[in-house]
Amino acid sequence: MGCHDIQDLRLENSFKLTRVGITGVRKPVEVRRNGRSVHLTAEIDVFVDLPPTQKGSHMSRNAEIIGEMIESRVREEVSSLEDLAADICRELLDRHEYATYAEVHMLADYFLERRTGGGRAMLEPYKLMARATSRRGDGLMKMVGVQVEGMTACPCAMETVRHILGERVPELGKVPELPMMSHNQRNRTTLMVEVPEHVPIEADDLIGIVEGSLSSPTYGILKRADEAEVVLSAHRNPKFVEDVVRDILRKLLEKYADLDDSVHVTVRSVSEESIHKHNAFAERVTTLGELRD
Amino acid sequence: MGCHDIQDLRLENSFKLTRVGITGVRKPVEVRRNGRSVHLTAEIDVFVDLPPTQKGSHMSRNAEIIGEMIESRVREEVSSLEDLAADICRELLDRHEYATYAEVHMLADYFLERRTGGGRAMLEPYKLMARATSRRGDGLMKMVGVQVEGMTACPCAMETVRHILGERVPELGKVPELPMMSHNQRNRTTLMVEVPEHVPIEADDLIGIVEGSLSSPTYGILKRADEAEVVLSAHRNPKFVEDVVRDILRKLLEKYADLDDSVHVTVRSVSEESIHKHNAFAERVTTLGELRD
Amino acid sequence: MGCHDIQDLRLENSFKLTRVGITGVRKPVEVRRNGRSVHLTAEIDVFVDLPPTQKGSHMSRNAEIIGEMIESRVREEVSSLEDLAADICRELLDRHEYATYAEVHMLADYFLERRTGGGRAMLEPYKLMARATSRRGDGLMKMVGVQVEGMTACPCAMETVRHILGERVPELGKVPELPMMSHNQRNRTTLMVEVPEHVPIEADDLIGIVEGSLSSPTYGILKRADEAEVVLSAHRNPKFVEDVVRDILRKLLEKYADLDDSVHVTVRSVSEESIHKHNAFAERVTTLGELRD
Amino acid sequence: MGCHDIQDLRLENSFKLTRVGITGVRKPVEVRRNGRSVHLTAEIDVFVDLPPTQKGSHMSRNAEIIGEMIESRVREEVSSLEDLAADICRELLDRHEYATYAEVHMLADYFLERRTGGGRAMLEPYKLMARATSRRGDGLMKMVGVQVEGMTACPCAMETVRHILGERVPELGKVPELPMMSHNQRNRTTLMVEVPEHVPIEADDLIGIVEGSLSSPTYGILKRADEAEVVLSAHRNPKFVEDVVRDILRKLLEKYADLDDSVHVTVRSVSEESIHKHNAFAERVTTLGELRD
């Protein structure tokens, strides 16, 4: 073919590139784990670096690798989105012989059964995330992540409301344990954790940690009594976004006491404030070692 | 030029098209109204219909019209986004001689000064919308619209909470007027009203009507006491999305008692429910005449 | 429970609402059709109307219906997204006894195997859409839709380029059939067709009709020769968005010659113009009967 | 007020947070520079860090600072979005006395007059970006950025098409300089450059560098001859995303030869491939010093 040299053209006095690849690839992925088969629609980005001497990255190899890893060979064996990301990442370095670095991102809708106090079971939506990066000759790092929506109620507004109402309604002084009105809102929290070799981390556990760190989980179906219990429960448990992030960090340390100090962790919580048109945001980017200090 | 006939090629046995045009055009627009000059960045879509006998619509005329109406001739005279939309709409029919219908949509960020109870003034963000449609020989219809973010607190959860707490805390029975906890959340409500010939409708009034129909407006800056008063005010004024839409309709009838029965109105309210991952939605598409019946 | 009357409160002098419901519900759906099982993640909106005499719509019934229809009873029997939408629509009217109208929208990622000229098979991404509406006592209308991405090359720029180059390069005059450079770009086209009772319409056929009406389909994996053939094929087949819509209409008439005149059809094509920062748009909203005239 | 201690509550055994703040604040900003006044609508995010001993960040201070810096004191003096970001960043450290780090992001629509070969002048849309970060006692870093849409034509497909057509149409062998068909598409490229103290960097220059590094700029209005010249020009100048990034880097080195080696630069180019449903991506994150090596 006439063009086989365009990407491979030798360049002089040019620049290396940090990441070159394809983004926004959509594929169906079937994950089999713990005896359960889950069908995901993943959105995938893949990158490798490019040396200063080469004109172009072989982009079509990226799509071929994704296709092969998902549609054929690996299909029967995918045990997690992050393992699939890692497999693709390794293959990127294999087939882009000029590359020294590879990176893979995956994002997918995900569902878990949840049950309200009233006993009703339903499927709640979450997001699964996976990430793998590898520097040639220097191993591979993979991360699993979740995005969870839930509810936060503000502890500060609650205290001011208690103070104001307490002055107006003396009877309230007799029930100091009474939860008070506050603003509450939809919150989106993401948690990503590095997955060490040979130590599986269950996305379902991460979702549980996040949901347990909000003022309350939220539910698709709430009949009247359930709804009131979610409201009461959230107000008994008011949380800043700062509190959400720190409670997740605390639970990670307990749950993953055996994991290495080097394990990377990112937690990010965003509350779509009901009293503002802007959002409240808190984040920690760290390692388990730093948290243990 | 070689290609001057492609769009004008005569077709046989083909189909008319309902709307053909360009979307996603971005332009700066300066509106001068009531002695105030406002700088907007508008996103614009324009369409005309196409008869079955003509191969293509002259798309470049659309961009020329937008450019001329905004950047040159009309620039000094734009008194509202909807008047600009109407001018563009008329010009579309003028220059697309084969068209029998034209349609224009505009959307822009907009700001108004607001003041909290505590007296702090600040600029709050809204969206302005405009729409014009015209059928050749049959006049022109223009609409002005606003999108407002604010807060709704749920009346149903509030009553259930009152009932549950009342059983647990007998003191509450003595203060029946006490507002109670509920879920509250960010709400986005849009209101569009047809603007009759010679009767200006102020977007600022529409924003006022929407903001006054929510459980509470929201603010960019809230110090502690202001925050609590917004929370208390919202809970004294709990609203379903249904209530928001109906209260807006009621206020429209009062405010625009002189407007014709034929005036079109659309109200749409969406609450990003804090207890669910999905939204609550209510809408009315109607005329003032229907509302007056 | 204390609150059982809030939604059911009787109102006087209030307004009916056109649509009240929930939006943005996400659920996994398994569709079994033609011996094939497909796993979809659907985004769902449902609405009913509300009479002027009733304060609130029972929103939690909407979520219950969706949950039941997808997660339990119907799960084994879903033969298409539009049949699921129709089932939910009927159930909405059943359980909202005060409603006279119900509406359901569904949207999901979808994949089909495609093969390039070079013989490579891969899964290409599409969107499936479904819609059902029902007026009590007046039957039910359901629609199936698809969204397809592909490529358009502009016939007008091609002719002007031919003219300019022809003057500069006389040799080109000897090969008049040679396709010429033009601008080409990503195009998104949606097609929705009403599905009559007892006449299944295959979404895969609709995708085929749309893909065959673009300048060229596009592919996730293209090795060098395939890539050039897609480019050549698109330039031999230049299309305005107007052409795309009309070719789809023509093919619909051929493919569905047996369908009733009353069947509704909507076609919408958007080209993300490579020479502009805005998009080109064409649309036809019609019935088969109108097209046949 | 009852709640003045909630954010200031002392914590033991808790965790510091990397960034806490507010996101999605929208404000109108007037920038006066080089005798020209520009009205922008900015979207703003601000963050500070939080020590492990403090429960909450004083979020309302963030909104107050943004309000004051934009609406009152600084309004008359804003000479660039990045200077405004820097002023806000300094103020964040001033008023969050517990913070050691502050970060500000701003994004706004922006317009420049452009003229086609045919002489038509029009306003083209771009995005302006600004970023400032500061570590207490360690100075402040500010960056200015631009996002530009334009067109890329693929050099690889062009060569393969030339090869295939050359075999089929021998006449083409006589005009080897003839540009050939390829796929071309909308490209979005962002360039961010650190702005050293006392050395202004003009966003308009950055836009010029990016636009000059694409296969062709794009225009809102193109009459027939202009349209063909843009197509021809792009095909005479085919570019991978890799080429776009490298050409920008090369021009930065020439234009900013006097800037320090330490100056940070990020270039990112995304082509919305017309032959694929996914995008092509290239990026370099670096310093001028690394580029000069």
Image (cartoon, coloured by chain):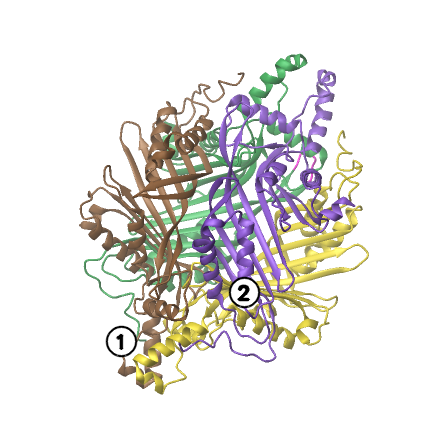
Chain colours: A purple, B green, C brown, D yellow
Q: Secondary structure at mark 2?
A: helix
Q: Secondary structure at mark 1?
A: loop
Q: Residue at x 41, y 39 (%)?
A: C29
Q: Amino acid at mark 2?
A: Asp
Q: Nearer the viewer, residue D222 or A112?
A: A112
- The disc placed on residue C177 is 1
Identify the residue position indicated by label 2 in the image. A94
Which of the 4 image quadrants contains residue A162? top right
* B119 falls in the magenta region: yes
Most prominent secondary structure in the magenta stretch?
A: loop
Q: Quadrant of the N terminus of chain D?
A: top right
- The disc placed on residue C225 is none
Residue A279 position in % (x across, y down): 62, 43
Highlighted range, magenta: B116-120
Of marks 2 and 1, the one in the foreground: 2
Say which chain tag 1 marks: C
Residue D87 position in % (x across, y down): 73, 56
